[in-house]
Image (cartoon, rainbow, N blue to C red):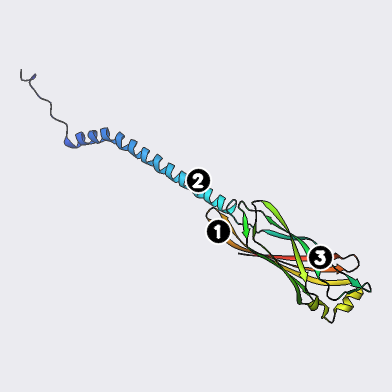
Amino acid sequence: MAKRDQVRPLAPAAKRQSSDEEGACPHHKKRGRKCLKFWVSVTAIFVVLVTAVIVLRFTVFRVKDPVIKMNGVTITKLELSNGSTPQPGVNISLIADVSVKNPNFASFKYSSTTTTLYYDRQMVGEARNGPGQARARRTMRMNVSVDIIPDRIMSNPNLNADMSSGMLAMTTYTRVPGRMEIVIVKRNIVVEMRCSMTLNITSQQIQTQKCKRKVYF
């Protein structure tokens, strides 16, 4: 009987504690894996968003320079006496075919444009056009009519010599101030063009032309 009633001793406390920790450990591991997956997903989404913003900033949202171009110039109302000298009191007009190309994804809205005509570094004519806009990824063309001031050009001492040679050197300066808005990006833009040209007196057409363009933000 004494052998049957004999009770086995309990396991040491340290051993029982370690077995309890082993039972709880799988739950902690599952939580850790879930947290790791969550933060990896958040980081991946953040990286994708930042990359998308950077790509849009340098592609769609990037403000590109509008391109201004002088397509041609025509002289009208030029009446000559002796085949080489402009008649006094006759108004002479210069019609410039100007185009503005907008390569952006938003419209380029501009205010009044100014075109100034110079002869021998003296202003002899000016024209102003009203406001307008060049639509997104389109080219806008406008005819600018510049009335030449007869008294100013006739009083220049070099005019007779230039007219006798059959060629008249002139310079035009065009300024187009405007504004571009692409979603959150807003820019004030000024497009300038300066053209040096030589007018053939006989044909009343432009013989040579060279233009320089600048864009200011």
Work out which residue is located at the far front of the displayed protein and give it.
89
Q: Which mark is residue 106?
A: none
Mark sitting earlier along the chain (2/1): 2
Residue at 12% from the left image edge and 26% from the top image edge: 8
Work out which residue is located at the far top of the displayed protein and give it.
1
Q: Quadrant of the N terminus?
A: top left
Q: Secondary structure at mark 2?
A: helix
Q: Which residue is mark 3?
A: 209
Q: Amino acid at mark 3?
A: Gln
Mark sitting earlier along the chain (2/3): 2
Q: Which mark is residue 186?
A: 1
Q: Quadrant of the C terminus?
A: bottom right
Residue at 81% from the left image edge and 65% from the top image edge: 209
Disc 3 crowd, CA 10 A, few/some/many (<14, 14-19, 20+) = some
Among the 4 quarters of the image, the one containing residue 171: bottom right
Place of residue 141 in the rendered image (x, y in percent of width and height, measured from the top left) = 72, 56
Mark sitting earlier along the chain (1/3): 1
Which of label 2 and label 3 is nearer to you? 3
Q: Amino acid at mark 2?
A: Val
Work out which residue is located at the far right of the displayed protein and give it.
82
Which of label 2 and label 1 is nearer to you? 1
Q: Secondary structure at mark 3?
A: strand
Taking 122 as reference, is 36 left or right?
left
Q: Against 152, is 106 above or below?
A: above
Q: Which residue is mark 2?
A: 48
